Image (tube, grey):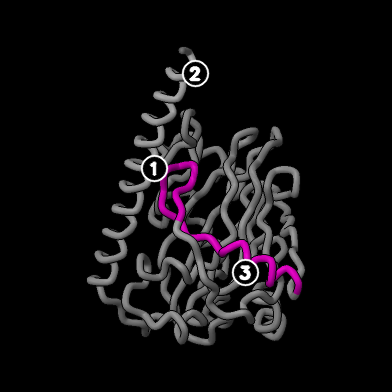
Amino acid sequence: MKNLNLKFYDEHGFFIYKNFLNKSVCNQIKLSAKKLKPKLTIPFSKIPLGYGDLRDKSPFNKILTTTDVQNLVDKTLMTKTELSHFLLVNKAAWIGPDVEWHQEVFNMDIYAPGVNKKKDWKRFIQVFIAIDPQTKENGCLKVFDKSHKAGILKYEDIVNIAGSHKRRVRSEDLNKLHKKSKIIDVELNQGDALFFNHLLVHGSTNNLSPHSRLTALLQYYDSSLKFNSKYHKKYSDFRANFIENFFKTSLNKIQIYKKNLKDFKK
């Protein structure tokens, strides 16, 4: 394992590990992903957007067995950790949707219900592995360098293109952040990995290129943390109700729009 630059991680909120995953494993994952039934497809298409948790499926779990990822995250967080989730995400060629500017801490009540966000955010880490090359052309991840130093930012609840509830950083706070932090395009070669903390502000643009970018996304947490399922249910109910209310409001707007079209015809 390469020497960790923990000072850089603490200062910038992330670090890049070059050649983290063998290219042959990346290619195996790409081929096998074509045979997987997706959990989520891109709206108005049959193209996969996400595949769900794959920690127990081969060859995807080779990320866990052929790399030193567990030891690496333990040393980074300086504690024993556990895997929270292991997802495979596809930003498809031509139509891969954008991802809003956000902090991972926004949704802790789903994957870590009951923790103290202000104190416990340091006890989590995200591992973002490039199964395909990731460039500005195909919508690579963007991060606000050192943005974790701004603390937990305020957010807006939204519904994204896939009909999922998300939380994005407010525009006014992004304007403030932009004056202090540089936006970095995290361009990665196949097999490179980005490790980042839960306050780092990040997002990505649409993929309008002919090149898809498949990503393995792993999250780890301090194994000594205790969770409370009642907070998970409360937040899950909120998310479902928020989506339902959004679409009810949208239907009302459609009825008004249809009425206006009839008036125009007259």
Which circle marks residue 39 in the picture?
1
Closest to the observer, 27 or 153: 153
Q: Which amino acid does label 2 sit on?
A: Phe
Residue 78: x percent and y percent?
53, 87
Residue at position x 67%, y 64% in the image: 143
Closest to the observer, 58 or 257: 257
Q: Mark 2 points at which residue?
A: 264
Tell which circle, 1 or 2, labels the residue nearer the N-terminal end.
1
Between tags 3 and 2, which lies in front?
2
Binning the other alpha carbons within 10 Å of mark 3 as few (below 14), some (14 to 19) or many (20 upward) gives: few
SS label for mark 3:
helix
Q: Distance between the residues labelled 3 and 1?
A: 33 Å
Tell which circle, 3 or 2, labels the residue nearer the N-terminal end.
3
- 107 to the left or right of 12: left
Q: Quick check: is 151 in the magenta stretch?
A: no
Tell which circle, 3 or 1, labels the residue nearer the N-terminal end.
1
Which circle marks residue 95 in the picture?
none
In this view, 65 is above or below 97: below
Q: What stretch is highlighted in magenta?
A: 158-179
SS label for mark 1:
loop
Q: Name the residue under label 3.
A: 173
Q: Distance between the residues labelled 3 and 2?
A: 41 Å
Residue 154: x percent and y percent?
52, 71
Q: Which amino acid does label 1 sit on?
A: Lys
Between tags 3 and 1, which lies in front?
3
Closest to the observer, 143 or 84: 143
- 205 to the left or right of 102: right
Residue 38: x percent and y percent?
42, 39
Q: Which amino acid does label 3 sit on?
A: Asp
Between tags 1 and 2, which lies in front?
2
Q: Distance between the residues labelled 1 and 2?
A: 42 Å
